Image: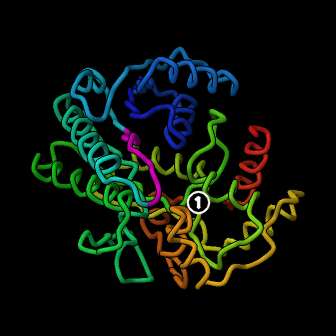
């Protein structure tokens, strides 16, 4: 039985990956930050009628060396998802330092233990931060750009660090990066993800809606891409930009309205007002950066190497709304 180490196992994407791995017959070891998270994972899997006999746990910290070398021991693959997700203007050390240092600890541990392949959960944030409006798998965020947010810096620096370490090791380990756009869909643990909080939950509550376009993908397809890339030799050394479609926020609002959710934004907020209000709101700072952006994405590696064509994310958005309202 092949073994996979998944860092940050209680996380939104990580738990979807763990579910798929167990159903495919892999043995999974996963890291969490506390014993309470172990209970959360086991409870979530049990609700899905997935046995936990082929999963074990370890307590790790992205900023501490303790336990990392043992975590990846005897593993064939590593999926590194653990990284802080804090939107808006925050202190860089809260996001960048744990992202980069955690990557180093996890990858160096994998190298020591002769792990076959390392899969990094990177982000579209490591791609779009430049002056372009068309993007593909080979584009990179420009770290010299002045208005980058700490999260964008953290994802770019951590992915660059991965490629640098792999190169310095003379390709002793194979690696690839998964770069999803905004990921939506229900959580397996009932802990609502930050991406669903910033989109679906906001749309359910707001009266006003900014005139902005976003690229979206369902969490189920993101997890599937991780595992397909892990298993495919053709994915070695590749990055995978993952997106299903680019839509207006109004599209999401209308989708929820058609599905029976009444709390729909009905006034489109002019761009200049969004820019003024963004001075006082970290959420609107994220939105203001994307005003007037009509981006076009090319997911060549996803389609050609993994042969994955994402399903419509609409049903997952509706399920997210249902989960949010139940949770409330």
Residue at (52%, 43%) from the top-left corner?
13
Residue neighbourhood size for the residue with mark 1, other residues' Cα within 10 Å, grouped as few (<14), some (14–19), many (≥20): many
Q: Is residue 50 above or below residue 291?
A: above
Magenta segment:
79-88
SS type, badge 1: strand
Q: In the image, is 259 to the left or to the right of 37?
A: right
Residue at (41%, 26%) from the top-left corner?
33
Question: Image quadrant of residue 81?
Answer: top left
Residue at (28%, 39%) from the top-left corner?
102
Q: Which is more toward the observer, 325 or 171? A: 325
Q: In this view, does 99 lie above or below 50?
A: below
Question: Image quadrant of residue 199?
Answer: bottom right
Residue at (23%, 50%) from the top-left corner?
162
The image shows a total of numbered marks equal to 1
Task: From the top left corner, tell me how far across and down residue 111 is, in percent.
Answer: 18, 36
Q: Mark 1 points at which residue?
A: 217
| 80 in magenta | yes
Task: From the top left corner, tell me how far across and down residue 269 is, in percent.
Answer: 69, 79
Q: In the image, is 1 to the left or to the right of 160?
A: right
């Amino acid at each position: 039985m092949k073994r996979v180490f998944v860092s940050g196992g209680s996380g939104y994407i990580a738990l979807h990956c763990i579910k798929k791995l167990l159903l495919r017959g892999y043995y999974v070891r996963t890291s969490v930050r506390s014993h309470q998270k172990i209970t959360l994972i086991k409870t979530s899997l049990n609700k899905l009628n997935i046995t936990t006999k082929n999963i074990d746990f370890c307590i790790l910290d992205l900023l501490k060396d303790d336990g990392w070398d043992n975590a990846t021991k005897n593993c064939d693959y590593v999926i590194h998802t653990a990284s802080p997700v804090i939107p808006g203007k925050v202190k860089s050390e809260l996001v960048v330092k744990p992202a980069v240092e955690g990557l180093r600890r996890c990858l160096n541990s994998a190298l020591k233990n002769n792990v076959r392949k390392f899969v990094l959960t990177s982000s579209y944030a490591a791609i779009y931060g430049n002056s372009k409006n068309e993007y593909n798998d080979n584009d990179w965020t420009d770290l010299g750009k002045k208005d980058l947010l700490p999260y964008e810096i953290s994802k770019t620096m951590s992915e660059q660090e991965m490629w640098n370490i792999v190169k310095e090791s003379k390709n002793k380990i194979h690696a690839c990066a998964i770069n999803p756009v905004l990921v939506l869909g229900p959580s397996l643990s009932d802990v609502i993800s930050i991406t669903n909080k910033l989109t679906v939950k906001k749309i359910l509550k707001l009266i006003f809606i900014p005139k902005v376009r976003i690229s979206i993908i369902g969490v189920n397809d993101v997890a599937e891409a991780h595992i397909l890339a892990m298993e495919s030799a053709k994915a070695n050394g590749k990055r995978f930009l993952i997106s299903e479609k680019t839509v207006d926020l109004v599209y999401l609002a209308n989708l929820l309205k058609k599905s029976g959710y009444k709390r729909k934004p009905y006034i489109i907020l002019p761009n200049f007002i969004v820019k003024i209000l963004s001075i006082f709101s970290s959420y609107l700072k994220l939105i203001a950066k994307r005003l007037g952006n009509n981006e076009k994405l090319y997911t060549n590696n996803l389609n050609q190497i993994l042969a994955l064509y994402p399903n419509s994310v609409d049903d997952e958005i509706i399920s997210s709304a249902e989960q949010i309202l139940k949770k409330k």
